[in-house]
Image: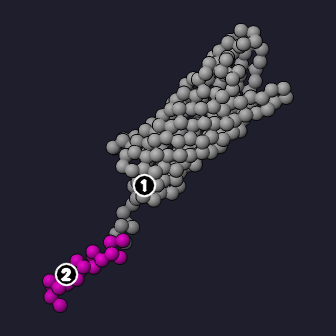
Amino acid sequence: MTKRALFFLGAMLLVHPCVLRAQDDLIPDRTPNSSIGIRFGSYAPVDAVFGEVYGKSGLIFGLSLGRDLYRSGGFTLGLALEAGKFSRTGVSTISAAAARLALIPLSLSLEAVVSRGVVGLWLGGGFDLVFYTEDSAWILSNGSVFGFHIGGGLTFQLPAGPALKVYARWTKAAKTMEDFSVALGGTEIGAAVLFRFKL
């Protein structure tokens, strides 16, 4: 067999599908599958009494962690763990004394994203644990409330940069006590800046 024939045979083997697949397996997948970021938005508790004392809405901000569980083409299914803080100062309708409300919601969500190019549409839902503290001259109350939420929005993956996530979310979290009930759920509209990486 001539050198030319050997060269031709070797070249054919290199481009054979089995060999190409084996070569692809050796190339590490560097597609980002995790994210960390900050989020901020406007939160409006649904409770009417809170609205009278603290105003209809206020700033909420926090951190977000994400991890992709499944990816196929333009579809991604992942988990998101988020923590936020919402605090407002108001005036009690009973004694006209200063009052302060602080909420720290923790949420775990399952989110599905359908993307095309740099734009994606996402929907999700999950569970919440909301820690609350209300402090005024006539009451000091603190504790936690379990709840759930649903949400959705758009994602924008900036070229060679972070992703922007625009969202709207509705949360239901209520707790019945001895002589009253507290409803800490509400609506939230905001955005998050996410930095994606391979983990």
Of label 1 and label 2, which has the lower sequence position? 2
Across and down, in percent, residue 43 comes to 58, 28
Q: Which residues are magenta?
A: 1-21
Across and down, in percent, residue 84 comes to 58, 32
Q: Is residue 16 magenta?
A: yes
Q: Which residue is mark 1?
A: 74
Q: Is residue 37 visible?
A: no
Q: Is residue 39 left or right of residue 186?
A: left
> Which residue sits at x=43%, y=38%?
164
Residue 141, quarter of picture: top right
Amino acid type at mark 2: Phe
> Which residue sits at x=39%, y=67%?
25
Q: Which residue is mark 2?
A: 8
Give the answer, above or below, for where 52 lies relative to 46. Answer: above
Q: Is residue 148 magenta?
A: no
Q: Main secondary structure of the magenta part?
A: helix
Q: Nearer the viewer, mark 1 or mark 2?
A: 1
